[in-house]
Image (cartoon, helix red, strand yellow):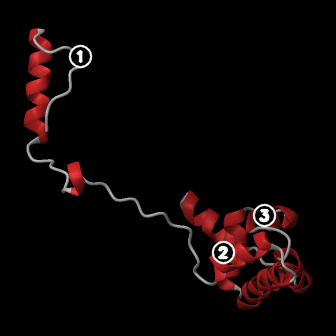
């Protein structure tokens, strides 16, 4: 058996006990997957493999995350309802699709379209004049 298969077999043999699976829900409310893996003394990849093959552990992980998010969201919503402007803006941006946008339009002289035309040729002509010493480096080329 090659090294990769041995590692995959060893990883697939690691299982959480019933008590550890129950603990995943509490830990998920506070820690990320890497931290939970550290808590159990396993790698993050091994913990992810456990979640992939153990439906109960995966469900408890998701439930723990969801409970924590709901708790924090509830606190945020309470602050927004109490008149905390920052909380209200944050809530509306993340939950109601609000965005702060600024529209900037560019135009040419007198509002006409910007002429880009033959930009490459103009740049090459300017470079050639600079090489020949005919053009002062501060000179502006007409569009």
Tell me where residue 33 sits by quadrant.
Answer: bottom right
Residue 29: image location, x then y, percent: 84, 77
Badge 1 marks a residue whose secondary structure is: loop
Badge 3 is on which residue? 42
Left or right: 80 in relation to 121: right
Tell me where residue 8 sits by quadrant.
Answer: bottom right
Disc 1 or 2, which lies upstream in sequence?
A: 2
Badge 1 is on which residue? 137
Between 84 and 3, the residue placed more toward the observer is 84
Q: Quadrant of the C terminus?
A: top left
CA gap between label 1 and label 3 equals 63 Å
Which dot, 1 or 3, sits closer to the camera?
Answer: 1
Tell me where residue 136 sits by quadrant.
Answer: top left
Disc 2 or 3, which lies upstream in sequence?
A: 3
Badge 2 is on which residue? 49
Between 98 and 28, the residue placed more toward the observer is 98
Residue 128: image location, x then y, percent: 9, 19
């Amino acid at each position: 058996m090659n090294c990769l298969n041995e590692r995959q077999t060893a990883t697939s043999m690691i299982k959480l006990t019933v008590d550890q699976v129950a603990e995943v829900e509490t830990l998920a409310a506070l820690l990320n997957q890497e931290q939970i893996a550290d808590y159990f003394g396993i790698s993050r990849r091994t913990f992810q493999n456990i979640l992939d093959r153990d439906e109960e552990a995966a469900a408890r992980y998701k439930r723990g995350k969801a409970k924590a998010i709901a708790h924090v969201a509830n606190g945020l919503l309470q602050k927004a309802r109490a008149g905390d402007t920052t909380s209200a803006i944050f809530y509306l941006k993340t939950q109601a699709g609000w965005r702060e946008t600024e529209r900037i339009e560019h135009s040419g002289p007198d509002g006409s379209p910007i002429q880009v035309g033959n930009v490459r040729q103009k740049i090459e002509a300017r470079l050639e004049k600079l090489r020949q010493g005919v053009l002062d480096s501060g000179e502006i080329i007409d569009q």
